[in-house]
Image (spheres, rainbow, N blue to C red):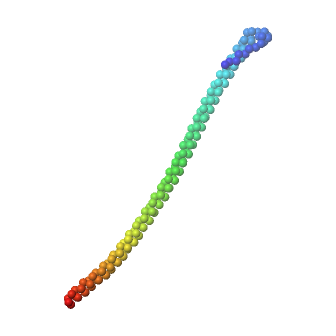
Amino acid sequence: MPITANFSAAFYERLGHDIAEELVEFLNRLDATYRTDLREMNELNFQRFTANVGQRFAEADLKVEQRFAQLDMKLEQRFARADLKFEQRVGELRAEMAEMRGELRGEFRSAVAQSESKLIRWMFVFWTGSTLTIVGTMLALLKL
């Protein structure tokens, strides 16, 4: 929107109509030139600003991606360590269970062996008692 320079009638009378109109045209062209230059400069500055903002966003995105990658690596390392500790603990528990199973088998075998020996003793006692009773009865029958 160009600004039109208007001068007073005295100005036109003193300089003359032609010179005043020429001055007005010159000032309007000068204004249009400055406006065009200012618009171009603003557009260039806006383009530089936009490029700078885009570059900063790209840098920030890169930093965020790098940070996430570092966090992922740290998490993977922690999970690997936790997994290793878990596997070690499971191995220890399996070894303890195998040891306990062996102990229980030994205790069970000794308990079964003790039961067998007690059973054999009682069988011998009953066998002896039965045999003595039968022999006594046979002797009594023979004497009759």
Query: Where's residue 134, x and y in %?
Result: 24, 84
Query: Where's residue 28, x and y in %?
Result: 69, 17
Q: Is residue 127 left or right of residue 54?
A: left
Tell me which residue sits at (77%, 10%) in the image: 9
Q: Is residue 21 above or below residue 50?
A: above
* Quadrant in which residue 115 is drawn: bottom left
Note whether residue 15 is visible: no
Tell me which residue sits at (50%, 51%) in the image: 76
User: Residue lying farthest bottom?
Assistant: 143
For the image, the number of numbered tags is 0
Q: Is residue 111 left or right of residue 46?
A: left
Q: Say which of 104 and 140 sits in front.
A: 140
Which quadrant does the C terminus fall into?
A: bottom left
Note whether residue 64 is visible: yes
Q: Is residue 5 above or below residue 56?
A: above
Q: Is residue 51 left or right of residue 10?
A: left
Which quadrant does the N terminus fall into?
A: top right
Q: Say which of 138 and 58 sits in front.
A: 138
Q: Is residue 31 left or right of residue 66?
A: right
Tell me which residue sits at (21%, 87%) in the image: 141
Q: Say which of 36 and 109 sits in front.
A: 109
Tell me which residue sits at (68%, 22%) in the image: 34
Q: Is residue 78 above or below residue 121?
A: above
Q: Is residue 115 above or below residue 96?
A: below
User: Residue lying farthest front?
Assistant: 144
Query: Where's residue 64, x and y in %?
Result: 56, 43
